[in-house]
Image: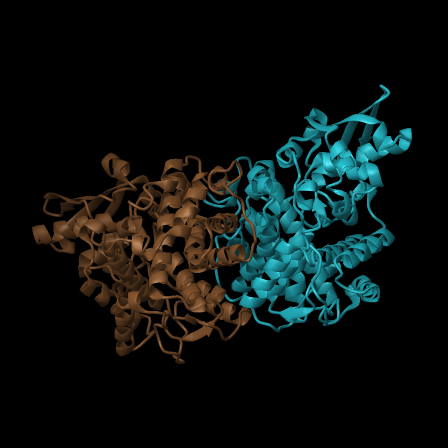
Chain colours: A cyan, B brown
Amino acid sequence: MSNAQILASFAANLEFEQIPKDVVARTEDLFLDWFGSALAGRGARPVETIRKLAQDFGPHYGPCEVLISRRTTSPLFAAMINGAASHFAEQDDLHNSSVLHPATVVFPAAWAAAQALGRSGKEFIAASVAGYEVGIRVGEFLGRSHYKIFHTTGTVGTIAAAAAVGKLLRLSGEQMVNAFGSAGTQAAGLWEFLKDAADSKQLHTAKAAANGLLAAYLAADGFTGAKDIFEGGKGMGAGMSTQTHPEKLVDALGTRWALSETSFKFHASCRHTHPATDALLQVIRRERIVPDDIETVVTHVHQAAIDVLGPVTDPQTVHQAKFSMGTVLAIAAEFGHAGVREFDAHYRESRISHFCKKVSMVLDREVDTAYPSRWIGKVTVQTKDGRTFAGRVDDPKGDPGNTLTRAELEHKALTLGLYGNAATEDELKHAIASIWAIGDALVVPKLLPDSKLETHHG
Amino acid sequence: MSNAQILASFAANLEFEQIPKDVVARTEDLFLDWFGSALAGRGARPVETIRKLAQDFGPHYGPCEVLISRRTTSPLFAAMINGAASHFAEQDDLHNSSVLHPATVVFPAAWAAAQALGRSGKEFIAASVAGYEVGIRVGEFLGRSHYKIFHTTGTVGTIAAAAAVGKLLRLSGEQMVNAFGSAGTQAAGLWEFLKDAADSKQLHTAKAAANGLLAAYLAADGFTGAKDIFEGGKGMGAGMSTQTHPEKLVDALGTRWALSETSFKFHASCRHTHPATDALLQVIRRERIVPDDIETVVTHVHQAAIDVLGPVTDPQTVHQAKFSMGTVLAIAAEFGHAGVREFDAHYRESRISHFCKKVSMVLDREVDTAYPSRWIGKVTVQTKDGRTFAGRVDDPKGDPGNTLTRAELEHKALTLGLYGNAATEDELKHAIASIWAIGDALVVPKLLPDSKLETHHG
């Protein structure tokens, strides 16, 4: 059997009962975290543009909920719109070594399919786990050379979504191979948009979720795809990576639960900024200094941080601000936390841009070698009165070794839901309770009641 | 201005009145040729699978016709289904030097948008020309290294469709740049499926047309994309080609009409088989020999022919047969023409597979150097009685130097329409008349009346 067939067979045959209890619980955690992120995208211009077009192009009714509009539609468009919404606030989860944001591509597709097919909560959880396990391994297979040009969450996300939806469609192993083939040949997403602060990121996650769902539904109807879309001579590895890692495709299937390695995002910024942010906060707290005391901050980073954040020298939008190392550190230094509200309210302020200019990035060999398996944060802080402090974190807040509690996750989801003006506090609490009980649902419920909220904010 | 901006500006500002009369007439020819190809896809399993899913996921009504079902839907799904249908029979057009099949991605998108927006025939023609001119240049820019792994019609087709639909949406030059950015970051399609005879080809054209249309509609609503999706450091060229040709992106805009360089397909097989097929037919007719007289046929080909056709050593499906040099030559030698009906009826016959084994491919330096600007056909035929004949064609039938007449195009469209059981002969003749008069239509019409034909054939 090829690695593609082994991986497909694993996904097709995974049963809820095989999944360790702590992995099931972590899946619920990740699902709640995704729900909050999806609501936080409500009202954002690129998200609402995709929602509006999807509503024009798609049916105005159906079995699947669109979280940001409280409308329903077909699974394709629910996956598309919820996928667009959940990556906007930069608060959705990240798997380190694959550099994949799994939630924003797996859950929109799996939730839409589970609702369309009337599946149980346990089946939904097993499907989500399959999506994470497959997606993370394909991301590791394509590796760092892929991520230099391609937005892995867009490309690999298509496969992850197909695996999850394929599971809900109860595909055979062979059908799952076909789903992977049809997903991989639709895989797309280039980083080029980033330097223009263009809107493509929302399109990438929207389309990854929708395209992956389409691939799985096609496979269920007998549509065939390439048998070896990963390693074949004209497949994803050949076309979209200069150094693949074939052994990663089937790494410890059924014993390593890669889902549990996924990190929650504590700060509302690009994940590449988090390690240095936490290291700076460590110095500020330990040395009891304030931003005004600081002369310079040197962040010691991995190459991908320089590649992704380097072009953002003068952030003009709140989205760019989240990709500006200096701005993120400035906001965190000022408020102790770089959350969605802190960015919206303060990213343009002169004290923030003043601090931003104090921050530089240098490539660090230790950090770069550890990446992407570990995201080490190292900073050197120079004070105006001539002192030098080193900060270091080995597990940024939200990483598996320093994870968020259920109380912290509930607080984050509530904050994001209210930020998006997407639901009342009561509605959110009801949804949170539904999510904690999802494993007992015979048929997955709706998370939010239908209603007609007005669209707001930007 | 960047090349992307120059190209976008050309597309946005192109007026019907600037387009030479012979280019307008050729556009009508290509549109008719596309119409026949779309109808020929009716009933084919992969096409019908996409149609069925698109109908499940999309609205069951709308302003746009689905040619193979006589239903209507939204522009996204009309583009998707008509795009899936028109590349199946391997009878749609090809532009040589870009190795792009423009019709199957430009017309499904442009026709759907023109119907949705109620545009005139002249506007539809100008939009189609913009789609061809842009798509061909982007295909030439990405070049042969791209085509080795990627199905250019899938990838570049997204941009071509976006250009055509962007024109119908009357985008500004700046909006057109955004449409290109959103199209390019969705561009996908890998050749890996070919060796498994999988169904991806229909998915590629379906999605290219739909994704390009989506990109243009997004741009009209203010959604932004990368400004330099072609040449940027993390753009299409960087990620999907090892040798780009930047000068091609803006090659002789407004004076070179690349649309007129597009070839019609005379045989119903992969275009890489056509030059050798015509060269063999030349020998057979000139020397008055029959297939049984032939001991061996050596085809002298370009490298891409070996790359694409080489893996197909033992065709199991009619689709694979169209990618088997030996099978195509066998059918052409037997029937004088390798058409859709000849393939369906005879590709498995023992006399065909017997002749197939006589055919080999060798790389030819002259042919390879001329490719892809010119597709020279050269064969060496050895007869059983020991004679050796050389055949050579510089312009395979259907190429601009050896094009099809309007009578031949009508005959081809009628054949394909009846083959697909997609319409009656009267309906087809009415549609052909509509197409010849398209330039005078104040609002584009429907090509076929609504009705409920039963689905058939495979």
Depicted A456 relative to depicted A297: above or below: below
Q: Position of residue B75 (x, y in %)?
A: 47, 66
Residue B267 visible within the image = no
Q: Residue at x 73, y 34 (%)?
A: A326
Q: Residue furthest bottom?
A: B452
Q: Residue at x 65, y 36 (%)?
A: A314
In this image, B32 relative to A102: left or right? left
Q: Position of residue A29 (x, y in %)?
A: 79, 55
Q: Residue furthest top?
A: A386
Foreground: A314 or B216? Answer: A314
Q: Residue at x 40, y 80 (%)?
A: B452
Foreground: A10 or B2? Answer: B2
Residue A71 visible within the image = yes
| Quarter of the rendering occupied by the C terminus of chain A | bottom right
Quarter of the image for residue B288 reads bottom left
Depicted A451 relative to depicted B402: above or below: below
Quarter of the image for residue A139 reads top right
Q: Position of residue B412 (x, y in %)?
A: 24, 65
Q: How many marks?
A: 0
In this image, A152 relative to B427: left or right? right
Q: Position of residue A227 (x, y in %)?
A: 49, 52
Q: Residue at x 37, y 47 (%)?
A: B311
